[in-house]
Image (tube, rainbow, N blue to C red):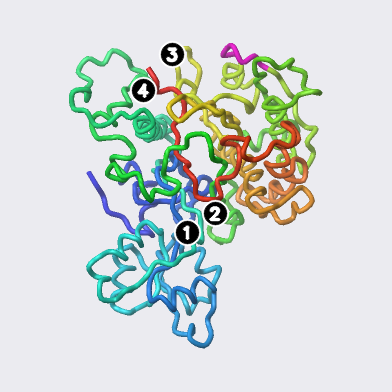
Amino acid sequence: MVVLGTYNTRFRLLNDRTVDLLLLGDTHTIEREVRERTTGAGFTFSSPYYYDGMAYFGNENLVECAEKQQRYDDCSPLLICAGQESTSHDFVQSSFPSDFLMVSSSLDEMTEMLWNDTCNVIATDRSYLLNLASSDENSDRKFIVGNMLLTKEPLAIVTRNNDREFSDIINWVVQALFYGEEQGLTKNSSLCQNYTNLTSHHVSDLNFMNAVYCVGNYGEIIFDGEQNNRGMNQINNGTTGMLYATPFGELENEDDDLEDIDVTVGTLLDDIRKKGSLNCGVVVPDGSDGEIATSDKLFGMSVEYCRTLAAALFDGDSKLVNLTTFSENDNSSFVALNNGTIDVLAGGRVEKKHDFVSSLSVGGFVFSTPYYYGNESAEDDVSVFSLATREDDEIFSSFVNCVVLATIYAWENGIRREERKEMPLMSIFGSEFNWALRDAIYYSGSYDQIYTKHFGDVLEENRGRNILNNKGGPQIHSFPGLSP
């Protein structure tokens, strides 16, 4: 059943279980992972199914005014409509005084406000605006979509964070759609199977490829098979970068109703802080001698991320970490993470088998934004490495993800170790972590600095996927685990 929500009610509908998931073009932000502002709750996001960005649409001259943030002379009539509690609203609110902004409760209402001249420019996802520009309603008006993409909008499916298994199922449906396009698999009714003879009770054994065979692959569903003008929403073949920092959102508590809520009480984040040290496991890749003191390349990067996380946790002290190494050739690292021997695992491969609770009584895990990609082709399983945490503590998982994202964000924004004060403050995890991102970057520097330290001065064109995707190149690829 489809339930229609508005900008202001959609997360409430999900939080109170009126709906099971949101598929309304919602942007993944760290703020929404930890504490979404209309509910005070945190949510789980799938891998982005569409990379978009905010643009302006309306009268050509006034769109140019909005892009230049000018409000005088010919720009004085500017009046911008944006959706309530949307990332577009946040951007416009930070760029213009309140009397230049009007709020709408839905896309339909915002569009109607433009058509009836309540406002003369609207701000929302560019993909929607392109459809609006080609609509019959715009044929006489000749309104235009602005040239500037002003925000990052990775759109994802949203679920509650207290049912990780269901969230994992949703994410692996998305992965299956990506995998289908990578492999040239399309809708095929002869392969679309029901579960009349289900012999396993493990959700990891579900046939996720049914999503492709019964409905279609990613390109078929989203783009009707078209390959042109897809921007970032194309399969990455390994020749362009995939490093992309999910937007932080608002990391400082500005809502009086939420300010006194401590989201870390009783969490692993709180326990580690009180204990005074982090237990970090590191997977030793084949061919490495396993010596932490001389570690380099991927092994060295993994050690570096353990120390960077410690710096973020303990006011900049990167030494407050106990490092334990594990072989790449067995499951001992994930067993140690599952039983609490270690708090976080660096250098673990992102794979389907590690995302779900297994028959070996090993719990499912949460993976941060990847910090290293292999150079496999688009048709192959790409090696993906990140920081892994247990599924039972979403606050600690979000904090860990924040630290990885901070290194990529720093590179995107030209912030090196010396400019750490340009990193955002972060009180959303509590005032004791206000400087966590600055402390992390003061230790490690940006992703580019970390990579160069452990791989040497490698030209960007020779780094494969391990460079920024800051030119709108392909960003889509499935995680390993779906191949037969």
Mark 1 / mark 3, whichever is N-terminal:
1
Which dot, 3 or 2, sits closer to the camera?
A: 2
Residue 354, image x, y percentages: 49, 22
Residue 302, image x, y percentages: 68, 29
Does the magenta-highlighted stretch encompass residue 331?
yes
Q: CA distance from mark 3 to mark 2?
A: 38 Å
Q: Secondary structure at mark 1?
A: helix
Residue neighbourhood size for the residue with mark 4, other residues' Cα within 10 Å, grouped as few (<14), some (14–19), many (≥20): some
Q: Is residue 446 left or right of residue 200?
A: right
Residue 261, image x, y percentages: 57, 51
Span highlighted in magenta in the image: 326-332
Mark 4 / mark 2, whichever is N-terminal:
4
Q: Is residue 266 visible?
A: no
Q: Secondary structure at mark 2?
A: loop
Residue plotted at (31% across, 26% down): 209
Q: Secondary structure at mark 4?
A: helix
Mark 4 / mark 3, whichever is N-terminal:
4
User: Residue 249 shows which numbered tag?
Assistant: 2
Residue 132, image x, y percentages: 30, 64
29 or 278: nearer the viewer: 29
User: Residue 87 shows which numbered tag?
Assistant: 1
- The residue singled out by tag 4 in the image is 203
Q: CA distance from mark 1 to mark 3?
A: 41 Å
Query: Is 73 above or below relative to 261?
Result: below
Query: Is 223 above or below relative to 308?
Result: below
Q: Secondary structure at mark 3?
A: loop
Query: Is 418 above or below relative to 21?
Result: below
